[in-house]
Each structure stands twice: as structure tokens, then as C-alpha cells.
Amino acid sequence: MIHPLRYLGVAAFVALTQLVQAQSTYNNHAQLSTRLKTLSTKYAAQASVRSIGKSTGGRDLWLLTLGKGDASKKPALLVVAGLAGTHLAGTELALQTAEKMLGAANADSIAKLLDTKTFYFLPSMNPDAQEQFTAKLKYERSGNDLKTDADRDGRLDEDPFEDLNNDGMITMIRVEDPSGTYILSKDDPRLVVKADATKGEKGKYLLLSEGIDNDKDGHFNEDGEGGIVPDKNFTFDYQIFTAGGGEYAAEAIEVRALMDFLYQSPNIFAVVTFGPHNNLTDAPKFDPSKVARRILTGPLSKDAKAMDQVAKLYNGRTGLKDAPSLPQTRGNFSQTAYFHAGRYSFTTPGWWVPKVESPRDTTRRAAAAPNTTPTPANAPPRAGGASGAGGRFGGMATAAPSPAIGGGDDDLNFLKWADKEKLTGVYVEWKTIQHPDFPNQKVEVGGIAPFAKLNPPVAYLEANADKHLKFLTGLGAQMPEIQLVNVKTESLGNGLSRVTATVVNKGLMPTYAEIGDRIRFVQKMKTELKLGANQSIVSGKRLNLRAALGSDESEEYSWLISGTGKLTIEAGCPTAGTASTEVTLK
Amino acid sequence: MKNRLKISILTLACGLALGLGAFAQSSDPDLNGMRAIGTPANPKVKWSWNYYMDYAGFTKLIQELAKAYPDVVKYESMGKSYQGREMPVITITDFKTGKPDQKPAFWIDGNIHANELQGTQFAMYTAWYLAESFGKMDYITEMLKTRTFYITPSLNPDAHENFIHKPNTTSSSRSGMKPLDDDGDGQIDEDGYDDLDGDGHITTMRRKSPTGRYKIDPEYPTRLILAKPDEQGEYELLGQEGIDNDGDGRVNEDNPGSYDPNRDWGWSWQPDYIQGGALYYPGSLPETQNVKKFFYSHPNIAGAQSYHNFGGMFLRPPGAEEDAMYVPQSDINVYDFIGKIGEKMVPGYKYYVLWKDLYTVYGGEIDWIGLGRGVFMFSNEINTSYRLFNKNSTENRFQNTEFEEFDKYMLFGDSYVQWKPFKHPQYGDIEIEA
């Protein structure tokens, strides 16, 4: 009954609705908990909050459920965020999207969606690591609160970071040393980059994370707080013996909580993850060689088609440009949700550093960011050194496909964008300190501030939340829809009747991902008769299972029934919903 | 390294090569006779080994051993099974000499596949043998001063109990008892086996059919054999005893459980469509989680052995070819040494590499212990048809008669049931065996 055209009005409506309260920075777990509870109280008819478990550090893993009626009985979309502890923006985007959806709940199209579908949000699946953003010492952390022996020396968390310049955050240290392999970037001397021998560059600095070698094993900060990295600990393509990966797949309780929820919610049709991976602006292609072996490594052909359809929807609805490529990584949730749990699975960072195209104008940049505040987005100490690099930098930015995350070109683009936007607090100027491990050497602390590249000031996210609401509602409108049509009853005499019905999917996507037909925990398309008293089936199966039904695909069933009175035909599956019709035999 | 070797070899010896003959060694005033060497001739805990113990049975034996040998045998629960049974681990060592968890230790488990009852027997026999031999055989006494054994009789106590006390086939219930939807219809365990003739067994159904390919074996009439290619058959086989309970046209497609606890371990885990029997993720079951917790809290475990049935094999890791790199040559040397001694000790048994000589297993216990924990690990498939008449049959199971002969000459026909007629709601007139 849902028609996709009805959703076209959503955008305009949402744009008029100002629901998101002014919020200056990202939430900690306590603030997030309050915000969710407030939301579920304000919209009690359409929203509820419960915990699906606790993190290793004892923080609730909140599930926000939007929709009317029995959520578990309706086809659902699941939005997951905050698996990457460094990605607060994903959590904020998921929340704002949910808030905007509720704010627009009275718009016809969204009201209809909330009637017929369920929207699950798990906004913060790695709260232990995310808490480091608002902790006394701020550093980018990915691991949960499990105490681990990261360097297998028999001691737990014995070599953490230290805040050597007392600015409350962990950046980098550079040490002038003849054995160093790093130099100052010629494009932006605020950055320290690897010397490139092919360009005749020779290393001058050692580059280390901020801290000292507490256990004197020659490694810096190799065993600090932070245990298992959940998004390395899922089952698909899990990598053993890797830092933060855990002892075995699904060891982290956050991972088990999420997979339990997904496996035990057979109504979840698709998963959208906000995180540092992207398969939405450019869908993965079908590659026969990747599905020819026992262990699949690429999508099945029908699924690749559906993913392409959704990628088009994403690009069309969000209008976002210059997305970073951000390939999937080993043992992450997004791929596990597809390859192991058998659901369509999409992922996007939701926000990324816009590409700054114009060649660098050092005069303007220096003027735009005066060197006055303690941690300014300041001009480099040797700004002049970068003149003449402008043209080349512009060329590089065009060629580099992933400007948002990572080092090198990403850092350059980030600083350029931060300068342009006059952001403060995103860069720490290099400052000389005394370092006990390098007593007679020049050691400086500084660099890009933790979290800055992935997480813009919160104000930058609102427009993206609008865009992702359009995408989510668009995806909801494309979901499968089961109908029972051409239902016929013919009396054949002797109390015998033939009942015929056609099951058809009038949605724009298959009833579930093709891979679901390989996975025992994905419930199959089912068509069954519920017989009345004194009726029996003479021919035909009472219960029929079949593979996923594609968009506009149909199948006719027919039964010979002995007896009279009412009987019910029921067809569907949890990811597509169930249609049912009653017939009377004479 | 050397010490680990000794333990492993000893365990093979304990479990598999007992009763080598009689020799006067020492006299026991309480024994009306002479001790046979290598045996606990006059045990404090008198126990019969001619039946398969149920949960109450092995629990009683554990308690009696702990009571009789308080300085050698202690037990604890490593946690509860899915249905809430405690899972006992027996610690056997000389508790008066050193701390148990600071001695190199050997782990033994059995019965992860619940129908493989022999694993429980062998694990318990080892515990009993060690306890009864301590203080009597110098080798054992010395070993328990410096070594610890952790022995658990069943990794699948729920289904172990179900297998013994409920109607089953010879291979159900291999799985545990956690209810699951096997056929994806949204209903759980709705079409299991049915004991149609009420004899307490789930056996085979056959029907007379002009297109059937089976005929009665003239020599052993309880048995069906394949008709020759140019010969007309008399019967068709209809699978295991049961009916189509849910009207989907299939019989017995959704039994209780239907998963494999030995595909629930954290090494190279793969989902069910790649590795049949797997659940949500490694450690979906409380039973396997309990073992993991025990291993992490006992880093002194250096060697391990898992008892299965059947086929006469000493299997070593890895379970998958792509993991061969995790068993370096120095480890292979150790495995080869032990495995080859095993072949010598138990005629008919083969020392095999799991993936190469048997089949590929993802997410198996053998790999989690062997590769994930770096513990020398064998999985033993107890018994082989070689042991029937001490020779390998040259024919396949549908041609040879070794089991029938064994039943006739050694078991006096006790192992077969006769065919009985039955009116089946879907198949009509059928017969149920045996």
C-alpha cells in the first residue's frame, strides 16, 4: 500500500521543522542516555528506548525503536553507529536523524512509514571508547574497557599515553634524530610526513604518539587503556593475532550483544551503519570469482543489483559529493551483517571533510587564522615554505579519492578546510618539551587534535542529518510489500473445492537479500493455509517455503480442499511483512 | 617440550591400550588372587565399566573418587549447560605437592557430540585409572607430583541425557538441545522424529516399491542391501522414523537442536552455510563458553585431548588447509612423534591431519585449542571396525558383513531389531526396523 511518490514531500517538511536543540559538542554516555529518554518520553506513541546489553565498562547499549504497534512484527531497518570509538559524528547523525524523523512523524508519508515499518537505532555501540572524547585526557580510542595485555608481556595496560604538554589531549611527539624517517611536509609544515627517498628527501624526525616508554621495552604507549576494538572483532573475515582484534571473533560483549540482537530480530531487512566505511556512494560490484568458492568474499549477483539501486537512492537523496572511498575492513560489522547475518548492509561515514579545491593562498590563510589562541588553527611557523606548492596540492586533492580519513593528503585537505572554516582547537602547535626517554634531544609535541578529522563541530552535522533522513525514508519506501491477489475458490462437488492464490511482491526490493536464502537464521518466504474445522487438504502442501521473491515477482499456489467454511491464506516473511486473506468454501 | 610429550603419550596409553596381560608384581592381601600389571586390581572405588553412564552415573563416580582420594581428586563446575546442568571438571594431581595451577596440565574432554558416549567413558576411565594408580604405580605417582590433569566427561550433558533416555537414532542427538528453527519457517522444532512404533528407538522406514533399489540380504534378513544393477529391487528407503508434522511436504526437517557444538569455537569460524552446524558466532553456546573461560583461567594447560567416536583416528590440527601456516615444523615434529606412537599402541588407528586426511572443519575445538591457545591438541575418534575382527574390510559397508557377523557371533543377535509393519499417515503401508 505504500507508494514511494508520497515521500517526495518529506524533505520540504523536515526542512521547516526545527527540532534539534542547539548543542555545542558531542554527548558523553550520560548525556546520550538522558537525550534518548527525553526523546522516548516526548514521543511516547512512536518511540521507545531499551538497553540490549552493557558494554565491557558497564555502559548501557541503547536501542531506540521508532514505529507504532508491535515493532518486532513489522519489517525493519536498523541504523548502527558509534562502533568506531573515534566516530562521535556517526552517533550524533543517527540521533539527529531519529529526532528529525519523530519531529516529522505527523507528515503523511512519515506517519505511514512509522505505521508499517520499524526503525531501530543503536546509536552508540562502543560507548567505552567514545567516552574518551569527554574524558579528562582526550585521545582517539577504539578499544572497549576490557583490560588486556596488548603487548603480551604479562602486564595489563602498563604503558599508556602521557600528556606531556599538559593540554588535556594526546597528539604526537617528534624527535630530532639522525635515525628519524620523517620530515616536515613541504606542502604544510604543520604536518610531519614520511621522507620520500624517490624525491631526494632524507629523514630528520622520529614520530611517536605522545607519551613515554613506561615499561622501558623500547615501545611507546603500546599497552594503554582500551581492550578489544569491536569493529575488528566481528566474524566475517576476522583477523587473528591483530592489535585490538581480541583473542577470537565475537569475544567482545558489545559484538555479541549486537549480533544477538540482529540474529534474533528476523524482521530486520537492512542495516545502515554510520562509521568510517563507505559502500553507499559506490556500491560493490558483482564479481563471479568472489562467489565461486566455499567462502564468499563478494555480494551475490541479485544483491549487487539491489546495492546499486540503493547507492543510486543514496546519491540522489543526499546529494553528497566527493565521498571518500573508505573500503570495508576485516572483521567489521557492516560486512558481517551481510555475509553472516544475511541482511542488506550499507555503510557511510555520513559526514566527511569537504574537498577544498582552490590552490593555496598562503597570505589569505595566514590572515584567516591569526596565531593568538593556545590551540589555534594557526598558520605554520614557516608558512613561506609552502608557497609555490599550491598548484601541486590542488592537483593532488583532485586525484586523492579519500580526503577525510588517514594521513598524508587527508591531513593536508583537512587543515586546508579547517583554515577555510576558521575552526579552532583542531590543531596543536608544536611545542618543545623535556622528554625522559630522549634527554639530550629536541622533542616537540603537537599535530592535529584527536577526533578533529572525523568529527566536525556539531553544527556541521544538521544538514547531513536532513539528507540521511531523506535516504532512510526513501529506503523504507522501497522495501518489499507482499500482496495476495487473484484469489479464487471453485466448488468441484462432493464437498471438494479448489483454492488458488497468487503471492506477489509489489515493493521495489526483494523480500530479503539473496544471501538470506543460504542462511538458516533468515526466515524464508512462506505461504500457508490455516484450515478451519473439518477441513482437510486433498492436494497441495499446507505450508510452502520458497526463496526470496523479487520486486514484482509472483508465484501462484493452488490447493484441493475437502470441507466447507472459512479458511485463511497467509503469505510473507518477517522482512517483508505478511498478507492474509480469508476465503469461504461452500 | 619433553614433559608435554610424556603427558600426551601417557594419556594415549591410559585411554587406549589397557589390559596388556598378567604378571605377578606385588601382592595385595585384600585381593584373592594376583594383580595384573598396569591395572588398579583392587580399587577403592569399585566401578563397572560394562554400561554407558548417564549424567547421574558419572556425577556419582566423580563424587566417589573425590571422597576416596581427597588429596588426588577434586572437582568443580566450570559453568552450566544450556538446560542448566552443572558441567564438572575433575582436577587430578598430587595436591600435597605444589599448586595444581602452577604445574603443566593436560586437558581431556569427551562427548561434545552427545551420541558419542564412549568419550564420556574414556574420560572417566582415565580419571578413575589415575586416581586408583596414584601411590601404587611409581610412574603415575611421580607424574601427579609435577603434573595436573583436568578432565571433563561431557561437553554436551543435556543431549547426552536426551540420547540415553529418549527415543533417538544412533546419530541423534549429536547436537545440543537448544531449540532452533532449522527450516526457516519461523517455527521451532516443529517437525522432529516420531517414535511411530513406540519402541523407544528412532529407526529406518522402508516401503515395498516396484522402483525400490534395495532387497533383503539373503544371509542376514534384517538387513537391506542394494540390488545389483541389472536386478529388480523390492524396497525403497524412506529415511528415519517420523511423519510430516507441519504439512510442508517434508519429514523430520526440524528436529530439536540441529547444530554442531564442535563448530562453535573461536578459530577460523564460519557460518552455517559454509560450515554446517555453526550458530551465530563462536561461543554461541554456554557449553563452549564455559570451556573457553576455563582455559583462560588455566594458562598452565599445555596439552589436550578430545574424545570422539568413531573411526579409529588420532587427528591433529589444523582443520583447514589455509591455517597450515599456524602449525610450524617444530610443532609437527611433536605431533608426528606422538601420533606415530599412538598408531603403534592401538592397532587399526591412524594418525591424521584433520583437513588433509579427513575433511575441512571451520570453528572446531581442535583448532581453537591447538592454534588459538597454542596447546598440543589431539582429537581422537575412538573405535574402528578393524577392532571387530582385527582386520580392515576390503569391501564397503553395503557389501561387507563384518557388523552382521560380529552381531551374530559375538553379540548373539542383540544389536538388531526386527522389521514391523506400520500404517504411515503420508506413506501408507510401511515397515519400521531395526
Image (cartoon, coloured by chain):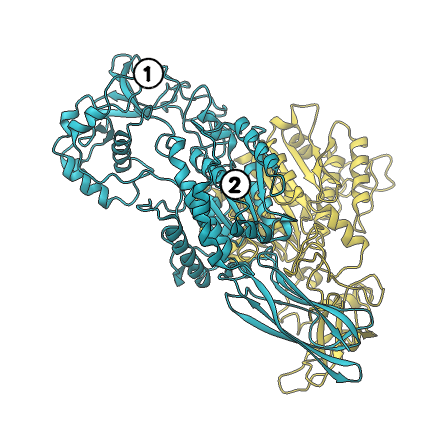
SS type, badge 1: loop
Mark 2 highlights which residue? A103
| Relative depth, front residue between A259 and A551 | A551
Residue at 75% from the left image edge and 72% from the top image edge = B205
Q: Is residue B225 visible?
A: yes
Image coordinates for residue B40, horizontal then vertical, percent:
77, 39
Question: How many other residues sit within 10 Å of disc 2, few (<14), some (14-19) or many (≥20)?
Answer: some
| Relative depth, front residue between B417 and A584 | A584
Instruction: Measure the C-alpha gap from mark 2 to mark 1.
Output: 56 Å
Q: Callout 2, which amino acid? A: Gly
Q: Which of pointers 2 and 1 lies earlier in the amino acid sequence?
A: 2
SS type, badge 2: helix
Residue at 24% from the left image edge and 28% from the top image edge = A192
Q: Is residue B149 left or right of residue B337?
A: right
Residue at 30% from the left image edge and 39% from the top image edge = A354
Question: How many other residues sit within 10 Å of disc 1, few (<14), some (14-19) or many (≥20)?
Answer: some
Image coordinates for residue A126, horizontal then vertical, percent:
51, 34
Check whether the beta carbons of the residues at disc 2 and disc 1 lie within 8 A of each other: no
Residue at 43% from the left image edge and 20% from the top image edge = A137
Q: Is residue A216 left or right of residue B51?
A: left
Chain of the residue under label 1: A
Q: Which chain is yellow?
A: B
Q: Is residue B295 visible?
A: no
Q: Quadrant of residue A496?
A: bottom right
Mark 1 highlights which residue? A437
Q: Which chain is cyan?
A: A
